């Protein structure tokens, strides 16, 4: 593509854009066809769901209200699609008996939306009693409702017959016990039929009420015809087990639907048929399915796509050729003008200008050429202006040097002032040092006093600890004495008990002795019986001896406890004496501490006087430091001024060096191109971009650097600084 001309590339680009547009249009048509199939299918399924809901609501609400329905049919028939059908027009009626609440009336109206106006009782009666409902058969050339059974003298409708002879069914209309839904064809369009059985008093099915509505809108039929499907597609209903409720559904499609769990509103395909099904919002677990063969759908689309490509391809090709030829002509003309302007500039004519009004790449290139020519025109005018700038820079350099000398003299004077201030500050610092020595001595005395206080405080702490330990021991002995006292009380109570026992035994002994005496006097020789009494007296005497021994033991224990209590009390007295001695030592330590504190107070007073003297000296030093700060600030400003002057001198010197290099470059390389007006003029010119043109006689381009700069750069040496800068560095 690098060697292909621009017009050819532009033509190929236009052709590619046209093909891309055709492809995008084709894909859009395919997507629109698929979306149209879905939208029309969804509209058809809405009809299915609405009709099912009406039939179920009517049946369930009638059963809940306990209403009995009897059917009376006229003996007339009409021909519909070549098949005899009972005509109920203005003659057939359903008799509804029973009581119903007002809430059932809207449900009846919803379920029988095409009722005749001759039954006003349904709209205003609170109780439903023998209301007669008339059904219409035809309404605006549509089959609406049929109420019927077998005509008089004729057989019931044959098994497997329906509204049209070419669409057989698999059920009987007269004796079917369960409700069902089906799809039939009427006037070339699929219709939905809902069956509800009606029973007589003997619970025998004598007829049915069928609700029939259009299943697919005419728009869907036109869509199918436009896409080339024709009558190959269709719709059907499946029960909860996947069995068809319409016989026209292909068995292959039904098996594919049973094995494919398509979600609500999604497509499914087995490679031959495109399926779209409605899963929810249908009663009895039924599913509504729409299908169309992919071959028919895609064949129509392919023909339309091929026809569109063949029709629209010549126009983009012709347009691409025209754009290529015209674009090449428009591109070559500005390039020729640029070549002409470049030739004139090479001959020395810089007055040519190009048209740069366009905002494309050609316009930008023309603008760049115009800028280049204008800069070449103002090149020689800069020479005279540079000479004037050199003169001005020399004058400014002289003035800057004079100002620099003045600032140096001022700096010397301020330095002398700083020296005198420094000498005075040194004298004051000596006095401050003496005062600090005195303060140091006082601080030492204060330190010693503090150490003595610390030692006395330590002793006081030890004495206090000893006193606390003594007090704790005294409390322990006191507790022991209390316990001993309690034990003495217990022993006393025991002595009382033993004394009481001895008294009791003595009393009984006396009584027994008296009894023995009496019995012995009475019995005479029979005194042997008193041996028992003698033995008991003996036992009592023994108990008396034991009690006496216990009394002795108790008394001994009491004596021991009393002795222990006395010893504990002695120890308590000794500890109290020790506590008294410790408290005396604490008092002495406190006295010593007071004396030390007094000495510390005296030392602190002397230290305070020394600090006052230091403060006065510090004030003097602060004032001197303030003067020194001011002087140093002035010195700083003077130094800044010197630095600024040095920078100004360096800048002016650099300007002089640059101007000298520019003059050298112009003199060495462009001397032959000087215009006569510039060589003889002494007045300074205006800005080089605003100066009048100066035509030259040659087309040589001036170099961007001087020979000296190129030589130094070639050998790795930097350009030396200007003389003024070197002098400034030497002064620093």
Image (cartoon, helix red, strand yellow):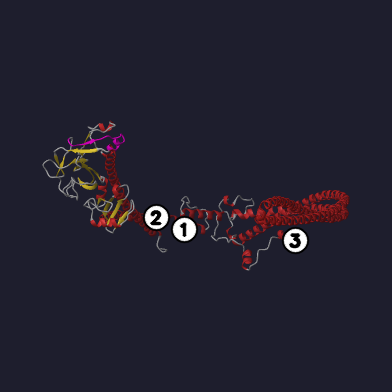
User: Where does label 2 land, which residue?
Assistant: 327
The quarter of the image holding the C terminus is bottom right
Q: Is residue 419 visible?
A: no
Q: CA distance from mark 3 to mark 2?
A: 69 Å
The quarter of the image holding the N terminus is bottom left
Label 1 crowd (10 A; few <14 / some 14-19 / many >=20): few
Mark carried by residue 339? 1
Q: CA distance from mark 1 to mark 3?
A: 56 Å
User: Where does label 3 land, which residue?
Assistant: 730
Q: Is residue 380 above or below residue 92?
A: below
- Front disc: 1 or 3: 3
Q: Is residue 107 magenta?
A: yes
Q: Quadrant of residue 476?
A: bottom right
Q: Is residue 80 left or right of residue 24?
A: left
Farthest residue to the front: give it. 525
Label whose residue precedes the other's in the sequence (1 or 3)? 1
CB within 8 Å, label 1 to label 3: no
Query: Dot 1 lies on which element?
Result: helix
Q: Which residue occupies the foreground of this view, 316 or 159?
A: 159
Query: Dot 3 lies on which element?
Result: helix
């Amino acid at each position: 593509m690098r060697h292909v001309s621009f017009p050819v590339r532009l033509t190929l680009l236009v052709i590619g854009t046209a093909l891309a547009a055709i492809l995008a249009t084709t894909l859009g048509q395919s997507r629109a066809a698929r979306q149209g199939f879905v939208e029309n299918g969804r509209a058809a399924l809405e009809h299915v769901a609405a009709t099912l809901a009406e039939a179920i609501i009517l049946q369930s609400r009638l059963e809940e209200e306990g209403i009995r329905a009897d059917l009376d049919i006229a003996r007339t028939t009409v021909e519909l699609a070549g098949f005899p059908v009972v005509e109920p027009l203005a003659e057939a009626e359903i008799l509804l008996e029973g009581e119903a609440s007002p809430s059932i009336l809207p449900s009846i109206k919803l379920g029988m939306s095409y009722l005749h106006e001759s039954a006003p009782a349904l709209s205003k009666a609170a109780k439903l009693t023998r209301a007669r409902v008339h059904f219409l058969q035809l309404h605006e050339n549509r089959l609406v409702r049929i109420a019927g059974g077998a005509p008089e003298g004729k057989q019931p409708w044959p098994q497997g017959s329906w509204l049209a002879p070419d669409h057989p069914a698999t059920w009987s209309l007269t004796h079917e016990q369960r409700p069902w839904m089906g799809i039939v064809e009427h006037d070339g369009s699929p219709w939905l039929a809902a069956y509800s059985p009606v029973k007589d008093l003997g619970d025998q099915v004598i007829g049915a009420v069928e609700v029939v509505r259009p299943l697919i809108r005419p728009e869907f039929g036109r869509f199918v015809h436009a896409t080339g499907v024709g009558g190959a597609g269709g719709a059907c209903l499946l029960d909860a087990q996947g069995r068809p409720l319409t016989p026209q559904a292909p068995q292959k499609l039904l098996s594919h639907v049973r094995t494919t769990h398509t979600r609500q509103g999604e497509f499914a395909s087995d490679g031959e048929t495109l399926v779209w099904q409605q899963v929810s919002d249908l009663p009895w677990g039924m599913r509504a399915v729409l299908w169309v063969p992919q071959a028919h759908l895609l064949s129509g689309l392919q023909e339309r796509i091929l026809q569109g490509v063949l029709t629209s391809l010549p126009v983009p090709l012709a347009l691409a050729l025209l754009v290529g030829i015209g674009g090449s002509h428009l591109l070559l003309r500005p390039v020729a003008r640029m070549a002409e302007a470049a030739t004139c500039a090479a001959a020395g004519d810089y007055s040519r200008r190009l048209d740069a009004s366009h905002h494309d790449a050609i316009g930008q290139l023309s603008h760049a050429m115009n800028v280049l020519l204008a800069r070449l025109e103002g090149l020689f005018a800069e020479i005279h202006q540079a000479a004037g700038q050199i003169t001005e820079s020399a004058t400014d350099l002289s003035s800057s040097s004079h100002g620099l000398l003045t600032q140096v003299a001022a700096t010397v004077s301020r330095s002398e002032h700083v020296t005198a201030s420094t000498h005075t500050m040194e004298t004051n610092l000596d006095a401050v040092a003496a005062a600090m020595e005195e303060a140091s001595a006082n601080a030492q005395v204060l330190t010693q006093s503090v150490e003595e206080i610390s030692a006395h405080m330590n002793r006081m702490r030890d004495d206090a600890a000893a006193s606390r330990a003594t007090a704790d021991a005294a409390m322990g002995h006191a507790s022991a004495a209390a316990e001993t006292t309690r034990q003495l009380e217990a022993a006393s109570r025991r002595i009382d008990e033993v004394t009481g026992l001895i008294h009791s035994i003595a009393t009984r002994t006396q009584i027994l002795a008296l009894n023995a005496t009496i019995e012995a006097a009475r019995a005479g020789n029979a005194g042997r019986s008193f041996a028992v009494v003698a033995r008991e007296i003996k036992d009592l005497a023994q108990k008396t001896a034991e009690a006496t021994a216990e009394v002795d033991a108790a008394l001994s224990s009491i004596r021991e406890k009393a002795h222990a209590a006395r010893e504990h009390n002695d120890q308590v007295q000794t500890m109290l004496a020790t506590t008294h001695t410790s408290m005396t030592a604490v008092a002495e330590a406190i006295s010593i501490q007071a004396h030390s504190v007094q000495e510390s107070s005296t030392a602190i007073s002397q230290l305070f006087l020394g600090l006052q003297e230091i403060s006065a000296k510090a004030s003097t030093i602060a004032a001197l430091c303030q003067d020194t700060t001011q002087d140093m600030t002035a010195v700083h400003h003077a130094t800044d001024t010197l630095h600024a002057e040095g920078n100004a001198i360096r800048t002016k010197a650099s300007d002089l060096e640059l101007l000298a290099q520019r003059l050298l470059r112009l003199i060495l390389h462009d001397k032959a191109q000087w215009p006569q007006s510039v060589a003889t003029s002494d007045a300074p010119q205006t800005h080089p971009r605003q100066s009048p043109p100066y035509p030259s006689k040659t087309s040589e381009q001036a170099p961007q650097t001087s020979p000296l700069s190129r030589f130094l750069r070639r050998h790795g040496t930097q350009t030396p600084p200007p003389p003024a800068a070197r002098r400034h560095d030497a002064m620093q």
